[in-house]
């Protein structure tokens, strides 16, 4: 545990902001799997802070046995997250001897991170990303994009008929999905998926992960 760099007033100000893409509240640690899902999602997206001992209604209740809660969480993060995630935990003392745990997770340079529920079955793994105030399971395309971003290689693609149909659709509509692209272009889902992943990595398109399906849009010109 690192010494606290946050006091009660700073904690109250943070809680006032409400949950969002980089902030999540959990009242207790009795469902550590939900907490580690959030930790993985922060590491895979843009980083964030998890406050344990704060309700969804923004009430700062704190934890009575913060030592035990911290031990449980550290053990769960270290046991189930792969590759290892870099994070810090600090505590904020409340007025009645209760404490709030503050878990800070930076955006990871070794994405994607996964949760492996059973170490005996390493292939049964799930990655999560942060979408607004939720941690959603990453699709195969999102995982491939996270891997490709770390590779930092020049992405080359040929602009053929399927890409023409894709850009034509995006000229007339806001977004497209893998299945819709496969349908419009008359190609397999696998080829549609690979094409969209390449175009995201080439900074032509942008992916918007969702808990049901991902949407792709043309990348806004900076």
Image (cartoon, helix red, strand yellow):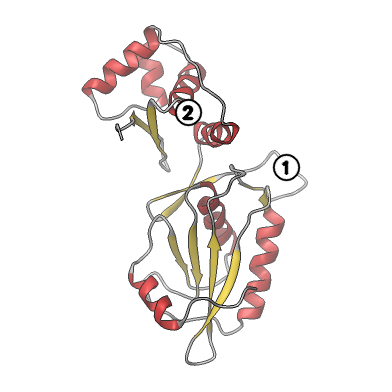
Q: In percent of the image, x 55 and y 57: which residue is there?
A: 39
- The residue shown at (39%, 69%) is 56
Residue 180 lies in quadrant: top left
Q: Nearer the viewer, residue 27 or 168?
A: 168
> Nearer the N terminus, badge 2 or badge 1?
1
Nearest the viewer among 32 and 209 is 209
Circle 1 residues within 10 Å: few <14, some 14–19, many ≥20? few
Q: Residue 26's spot in the image, x, y percent?
A: 48, 68
Residue at mark 2: 201
Badge 2 density bin: few <14, some 14–19, many ≥20, Cα 10 Å: many
* Direction right: furthest residue: 120
Q: Element at badge 2?
A: helix
Helix, strand or loop at mark 1: loop
- Residue under the point 21% across and 21% down: 172
Q: Which residue is mark 1?
A: 122
Residue 211 on image: x %, y % = 43, 43
Picture coordinates of residue 136 (x, y %)?
A: 47, 47
Residue 3, compared with residue 17, is above or below; it is below
In the image, what residue occupies the spot 24% across and 21% down? 171
Q: Residue 8 placed where, x, y %?
A: 44, 82
């Amino acid at each position: 545990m690192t010494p606290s760099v946050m006091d009660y007033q700073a904690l109250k100000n943070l809680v006032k902001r409400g949950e969002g893409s980089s902030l999540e509240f959990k009242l207790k640690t009795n469902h550590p799997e939900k907490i580690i899902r959030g930790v993985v999602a922060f590491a895979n997206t843009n980083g964030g802070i998890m406050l344990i001992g704060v309700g969804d209604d923004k009430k700062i209740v704190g934890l009575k046995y913060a030592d035990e809660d911290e031990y449980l969480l550290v053990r769960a993060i270290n046991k189930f997250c792969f590759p290892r995630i870099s994070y810090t935990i600090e505590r904020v003392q409340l007025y009645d001897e209760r404490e709030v745990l503050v878990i800070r997770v930076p955006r990871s340079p070794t994405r994607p991170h996964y949760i492996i529920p059973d170490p005996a079955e390493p292939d049964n793994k799930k990655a999560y990303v942060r979408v607004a105030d939720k941690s959603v399971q990453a699709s195969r395309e999102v995982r491939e994009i996270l891997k490709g971003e770390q590779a930092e290689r020049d992405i080359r693609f040929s602009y053929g008929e399927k890409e023409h149909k894709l850009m034509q659709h995006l000229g007339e509509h806001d977004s497209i999905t893998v299945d819709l692209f496969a349908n419009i272009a008359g190609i397999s889902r696998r080829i549609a998926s690979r094409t969209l992943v390449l175009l995201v990595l080439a900074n032509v398109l942008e992916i918007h992960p969702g808990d049901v399906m991902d949407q792709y849009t043309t990348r806004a010109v900076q």
